Amino acid sequence: MELVLTDRMQDLLRREADIAVRMARPRQELLVARRVGQIELGLHAHQRYLSRHGTPKTMADLTNHSLIGFDQTTAFIRSAGKVLSGWRREAFALRTDNNLAQLA
């Protein structure tokens, strides 16, 4: 068994993977898709940062903060962007697609 941890959408029809867990509904109609759960998303900040800059109360408040986020737009990012209008690449002071780098 090989486990590949990536945010890249593997093409199951081209056998790039046998099973995929995705954050967005697949567009390929020949695939069998099942919802296996829900993931709650959140915005996180260090207490020292919030002490210096204040805690945002609304999404509009985030424009006054240094945000860390994605570099490449994925299907999940496009889907989330419909709900979170300010959540776009240009809004981030640090951009990386690596989840561990974002956490660090």
Image (cartoon, grey):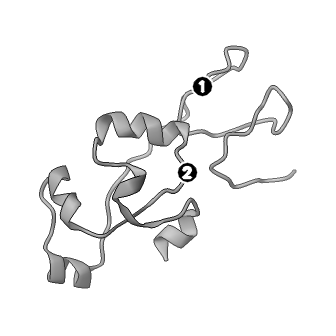
**C-alpha separation, residue under disc 1 versus residue under disc 2:** 26 Å
Q: Residues within 10 Å of mark 2 (few under 14, many from 20)?
A: few
Residue 47 drawn at (x, y percent): 24, 80
- From the image, tell me which residue sits under label 2: 72
Relative horizontal placement of residue 65, taking residue 78 as reference (left or right)? left
Picture residue at 46% right of the left edge, 42% below the top: 77
Picture residue at 31% right of the left edge, 60% below the top: 43
For residue 11, what is the image quadrant? top right
For residue 14, what is the image quadrant? top right
- From the image, tell me which residue sits under label 1: 34
Element type at mark 1: loop
Type of amino acid under label 1? Arg
Relative horizontal placement of residue 80, taking residue 54 as reference (left or right)? right
Q: Residues within 10 Å of mark 1 (few under 14, many from 20)?
A: few
Type of amino acid under label 2? Gln
Viewer-closest of 21 and 55: 55
Residue 62 drawn at (x, y percent): 22, 59
Residue 15 drawn at (x, y percent): 86, 33
Viewer-closest of 77 and 100: 77
| Numbered badge on residue 79 | none
Among numbered discs 1 and 2, the one appearing first in the sequence? 1
From this viewpoint, which residue is outermost toward the front? 90
Picture residue at 53% right of the left edge, 64% below the top: 96
Viewer-closest of 29 and 64: 64
Picture residue at 47% right of the left edge, 71% below the top: 103
When the figure is inspected, residue 43 is found, relative to residue 100, above or below; the finding is above
